[in-house]
Amino acid sequence: MAHIKTPICDQLGIEHPIFGFSHSADVVVAIAHAGGFPVLGLARELPEEIPGLIEQVETRLAGKPYGIDLMLPSKVPQEASIDALKGALPPEHVEFVKRLRQHFNVVPPGKPSFFTTQVRSEALFNQQIEAVLDSRARGVATAIGLRPDLIAEAKRRGKLTFSLVGSTRHARKALEAGVEVLVAQGYDAGGHTGPIGTLSLLPQIIAMAGNAPVLAAGGIATGAQVLGCLGMGAQGAWLGTLWMGARENHTPPALLARLVASTSEDTLITRAHSGKPCRVVRSDWIDAWEAPDAPSPLGMPMQQALVGDVFASIHERDDARLIYEAAGQSVFGIEALTTVAEQMSRLVSDMDTAWERLHTWNLR
């Protein structure tokens, strides 16, 4: 069959209704060249590095459309330093993490990163927003938090605005704030997510969206799933976890091995990573926070101040026992190291196969 294109494909100038979120610039560029719409996650980048990263990505994209995703939670400090927050951590949490560091032999990270030098604050968000608005990104997405001023300014500059929503309440607020595209992100999704499964959430969001396009997100790893979401009324599918199996993601070997070996049941929602509910692929570090003697994780941004350096260290060392990452139930789709081009080709081929299968059933 001819490749399926939805109205948002024509609006954005893309070949396939596949939206790919990634923190990797190489993945973003590869998705664009394979006909999808890539979304660069910048919530983990050092503020001073963002303009240069955007410039490099745009040079490599050579005019192809892309989006940028930010995480802008409310109830964070106006300004904050990681050292000040560390000084305010509850002693029982500090002692618990100290014991874990000793038990797992966690050494300090060897280089600075977002997780060791930054905490989420309004001042940080303002720096990130300024860089994103100055970019040539075709779309701006917010994963957590709504900023009507950001939405209005992004639209004024000709950018399409997206909001990831996990409930009809969130969707309603997004529409009232002027968001143009809703991304219905189900419980299945990796990263910060809500309590409703994708197949239950998607029709509810479509029903209230009116003329606003809706994308489906959460647990999607196959072209048949993409086609199924289109059949429900979505204009595309938003995938994130799958790309961690691509060479372009530069996934640490131990983490890649964990992802390949994992099933959907090997992911869980925890507050141990950031302080907000976040689906990750489990490891001994995550399991330690699920133990009966573990304290309840702190809220955002205090939890990052408590354990951010551990996350940085286990990734630096590629610690096979402890390493974890935000990952959705779609982890089942990571079977081996591959490439973005191969992944996109398989997604499109799977859509074709699913379409042909429907026709063989002589549906009336």
Image (spheres, grey):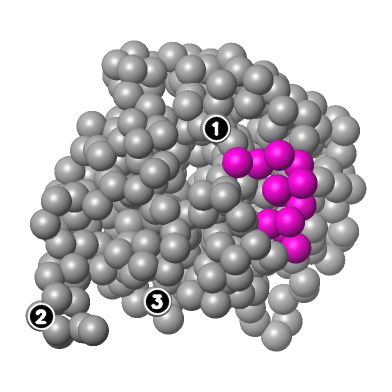
Are there few (<14), some (14-19), or many (20+) residues within 10 Å of tag 1?
many
**First in residue order: circle 3 vs circle 2:** 3
Kindly report the distance in space between the C-alpha atoms of the residues bearing marks 1 and 3.
32 Å
Q: Which residue is mark 1?
A: 160
Mark identifier at residue 264:
3
Neighbour tally class for label 2: few under 14, some 14-19, many 20 plus, Cα within 10 Å: few
Q: Is residue 172 left or right of residue 8?
A: right
Q: Is residue 36 visible?
A: yes
Image position of 325 with respect to 188: above or below? above
Residue numbers of the magenta segment: 169-180
**Residue 101: image tag:** none
Q: Nearer the viewer, mark 2 or mark 1?
A: 2
Where 129 sits versus 251, above or below? above
Q: Say which element carries label 3.
A: helix
Identify residue for label 2: 360
Q: Nearer the viewer, residue 273 or 210?
A: 210
Query: Mark 3, residues whose alpha carbon is within 10 Å: few (<14), some, or many (≥20)?
Result: some
Q: Nearer the viewer, mark 1 or mark 3?
A: 1
On screen, residue 42 versus residue 144, left or right, reads left
Q: State whether the magenta stretch is mostly helix, strand or loop.
A: helix
Q: Is residue 116 magenta?
A: no
* Camera sees residue 103: no
- Disc 1 marks which amino acid? Leu
Q: Residue at x 45, y 21 (%)?
A: 53
**Residue appearing at x 38%, y 27% in the figure:** 65
Q: Position of residue 186 (x, y in %)?
A: 54, 67
Sequence-first tag of 2 and 1? 1
Name the residue type under label 3.
Ser
Q: Quadrant of the N terminus?
A: bottom left
Q: Which residue in the rendered view is the most extreme toward the front?
A: 364
Closer to the camera in the image, 18 or 211:
211
